[in-house]
Image (tube, rainbow, N blue to C red):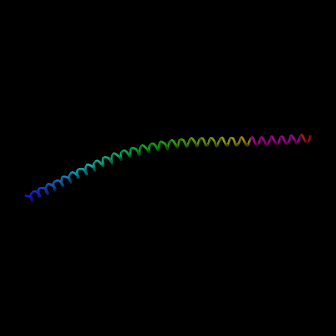
Amino acid sequence: KLDNDLTKLDNKLDETKKEIKADFALLISKLDKDSKKVNKKVNKNVNKKMTEMKSTLDKDKEEMKAHIALVSTDMNDIKANVTQLSHRLEKIESASRLNRQDDDLDRQAEGQV
């Protein structure tokens, strides 16, 4: 009877092991499916976020190009103004030299009289 009881217990143990293995296989399968779903969702969200970021970067890039164009225009205006001021300064210096020469000639003429 003891052998019979041991055999029954062994059979019950084997059956329980098989059930546990089957349960684990089912759990692993479910986890694998869930993992794939999560990965798919994560990838979708990452791709969406990447697209948004690229769009923002493209927009920022265009704004920077426009800003650079404005700065470039401003720089060209400044260069033109500097050139104009430089020409005016040359005219003023030239007129000043002519005035000094006239004054020198006037003094010379006064000195000769």
Determine the image quadrant of residue 105.
Answer: top right
Q: Percent position (x, y) of residue 44?
A: 36, 45
Give the x, y percent position of residue 15.
15, 54
Residue at the extreme bottom of the image, as rendered: 3
Q: Which residues are magenta?
A: 92-109
Which image quarter holds the N terminus? bottom left
Relative side of 13 to 97, left or right: left
User: Does residue 103 appear to the left or right of 57 in the view shown?
Assistant: right
Q: Tell me which residue sits at (27%, 48%) in the image.
A: 33
Q: Nearer the viewer, residue 103 or 56?
A: 56
Residue occupying the point 18% across, 52% down: 19
Farthest residue in the left direction? 1
Give the total number of marks visible in the rendering. 0
Q: Is residue 103 left or right of residue 48?
A: right
Residue 25 magenta-drawn?
A: no
Quarter of the image that includes the C terminus:
top right
Residue 78, image x and y in percent? 63, 41
Q: Quadrant of residue 74?
A: top right
Q: Residue at x 51, y 41 (%)?
A: 63
Q: What residue appears at the point 81 percent right and 42 percent down from the top-left corner? A: 100
Vertical order, 10 against 63 (above or below)? below
Which of these two is toward me, 54 or 27?
A: 27
Q: Is residue 39 left or right of residue 4?
A: right
Point out residue 37 in the picture as x, y percentages from the top left corner.
Answer: 30, 47
Q: Residue furthest front?
A: 2
Q: Main secondary structure of the magenta part?
A: helix
